[in-house]
Image (cartoon, rainbow, N blue to C red):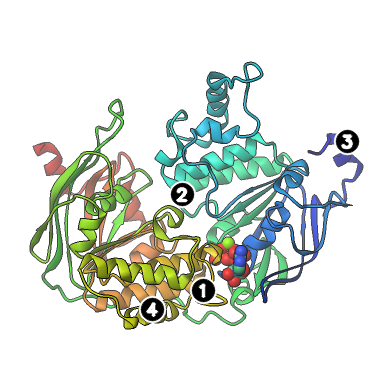
Amino acid sequence: MFSPNEQTESPNHPALQMRGISKSFGPTLVLKKVDIDLRSGEIHALMGENGAGKTTLMKIAAGLIDDFEGDILVEGKPHRMASPRDAARAGIAMIQQELSLVPELAVDENIFLGQEKVRSLFFVDREQQVRAACEVLQPLDFHGRIDLPVAKLRVGEQQLVEVAKALVAKARILIMDEPTSALSINETERLFQVIRKLAKEGVAIVYISHRMEEVFAVADTVTVLRDGQHIGTLSAKVASRREIIRMMVGRELQEMIASGKSETTAQKPVLEVQDLWLENPSPTAARPLLVQSVSFTVAGGEVLGLAGLLGAGRTETLEVLFGLHSGTSGGHVRIEGKEVHLLNPVAAKASGMALVTEDRKRDGLVLGAGIDRNAELAVLRTIAAFGLVSTEGEVELAERTIRDLGIQASSPRQLAGTLSGGNQQKLVIGKWLLTRPRVLLLDEPTRGIDVGAKAEIYRLIGTLAEQGLAIVLVTSELPELTLLSDRILVLREGRPTALLNRAQFSHETILEFASPGGSVQPAFAEMEVAQ
Ligand SMILES: Nc1ncnc2c1ncn2[C@@H]1O[C@H](COP(=O)(O)OP(=O)(O)OP(=O)(O)O)[C@@H](O)[C@H]1O
Ligand SMILES: [Mg+2]
């Protein structure tokens, strides 16, 4: 940890300098002599396509990768960064892209891990710890229970716990790897306020994000990496969006974002959902039902978007449909006219549903297995579920699907856990497609994916719809929702408030129906009275 003296003695030195950093994994060189300076009080955005090396560079700064070439200087002095402990001593904290909380420990235990508040030598003072945790979390507008395991929290809330943890560690250099990818608009704004405040207090912030609007909203400086090389560092005040994209992809982005999908001609419904509900597992909660009176149909070839703020019940709706939720739930679901029982994911899969979740680590992939093995597992499981026999063709199909999705990897054998974040997400989608679903439920499918890869995923969603799949899409990015959806069902506090067709799509309209106290379409208002 810095002493305040050290800082005033050397006011002109950057808080952190990385010089000529190179790193290879096996034969692949993923960082090539990268230089970057971070200054106290500066919010420094780090951008680049999936696999550009952003996470790797920052893991080196945070002592999470120790075998690299190059030098690291802290406040102008060379610093050996061989372990997270070294980094912590230098005041560096990193909130990782894939959250690294201990799922079975409570919120306060995670925040104070390694620096527990103790009553005596052996006893942790939980009461004091919970109180202290509460103090850090309150300004972040955290709504979860502090004494419950973090595994019980939604990703958005877990992210706030990570931020709190870094705040408690009094980091002087705080690295955030895509911190807002699972946050709602309000939470993002709240996090920005926290970041700005920290910067004012002299903390150097590294902000990795694929979201251009965010970078312009919060960053002072932007550094772009491409293929492991430092392409340039610009002031965010003078840089243009176009310039940054050109630096990232190495060419002009000529409408790489496809026009979305063509309007569908109405077909008969593939998915029919009626009066879906889900009880709130916490009996004392103000809202006894997390999902209530949710009804909709999705035709083959149609994309139905679910809009809503965090906590509106979008993810829960998908989870109930997929039989994934532990809470008491009910409702009627038909797939191609056949009643489906919402028992468990195995039953859901067998009836033709697939769910791509927002949390790759927990539900998506076997991170310790190769890409080929992950693909193969998906196919084998489906084959097993239908009592078929595996053939070599299936495995080939798996590899081809993975190739078609444009996953960047050194070989099909590369471990899923070592793929860059965006490439992991593509693999998750690919894996589910191999189960040949009729209904595809997508929860934040482009979370953490760069502009180019996003365009590929958009095209993929369009193609899948054209092949006749019924798709339900949840995304917090409104431009994405309006681009891809044929209709949008807006949820607020677990209930539908509006069903919009393309002509009615606008960000203002969606927010009006999504926000507490906003409008409700007459069709849905009547239902509310009737109950
Ligand atoms: N442990 C590892 N073993 C092998 N290759 C790795 C490992 N970690 C990262 N890589 C490779 O290094 C490259 C850079 O990955 P990195 O995670 O730094 O990218 P990124 O810029 O953070 O991408 P994203 O935006 O998708 O998160 C990728 O090609 C990735 O596959
Ligand atoms: Mg990354």
Residue found at x 40% / y 39%: 152
Please say if 119 is above or below 446: above
Q: How far is disc 4 from disc 3 in space, using C-alphas?
A: 57 Å
- Between marks 2 and 1 in the image, the one whose residue lies nearer the viewer: 1
Please say if 528 is above or below 64: above
Dot 1 corresponds to which residue?
A: 413
Sequence-wise, the earlier of marks 1 and 3 is: 3
Q: Toward the viewer: 207 or 50?
A: 50
Sequence-wise, the earlier of marks 3 and 2 is: 3
Q: Amino acid at mark 4?
A: Thr
Which numbered circle lies on residue 5? 3
Mark 1 CB within 8 Å of ligand 1: no
Q: Amino acid at mark 2?
A: Leu
In the rendered image, the quadrant that contains the N terminus is top right
Mark 4 residue element: helix
222 relative to 451 in the view: left or right: right
Residue found at x 54% / y 67%: 419
Which numbered circle lies on residue 92? none
Dot 2 corresponds to which residue?
A: 183
Dot 4 corresponds to which residue?
A: 401
Q: How far is disc 4 from disc 1 in space, using C-alphas?
A: 15 Å
Q: How far is disc 3 from disc 2 in space, using C-alphas?
A: 37 Å
Sequence-wise, the earlier of marks 4 and 3 is: 3
250 relative to 364 in the view: left or right: right
| Residues packed near mark 2 inside 10 Å, few (<14), some (14 to 19) or many (20 plus) | many
> Quick check: marks 1 and 3 in contact, CB under 8 Å?
no
Mark 3 residue element: helix
Q: How far is disc 1 from disc 3 in space, using C-alphas?
A: 50 Å
Residue found at x 47% / y 41%: 103
| Residues packed near mark 3 inside 10 Å, few (<14), some (14 to 19) or many (20 plus) | few
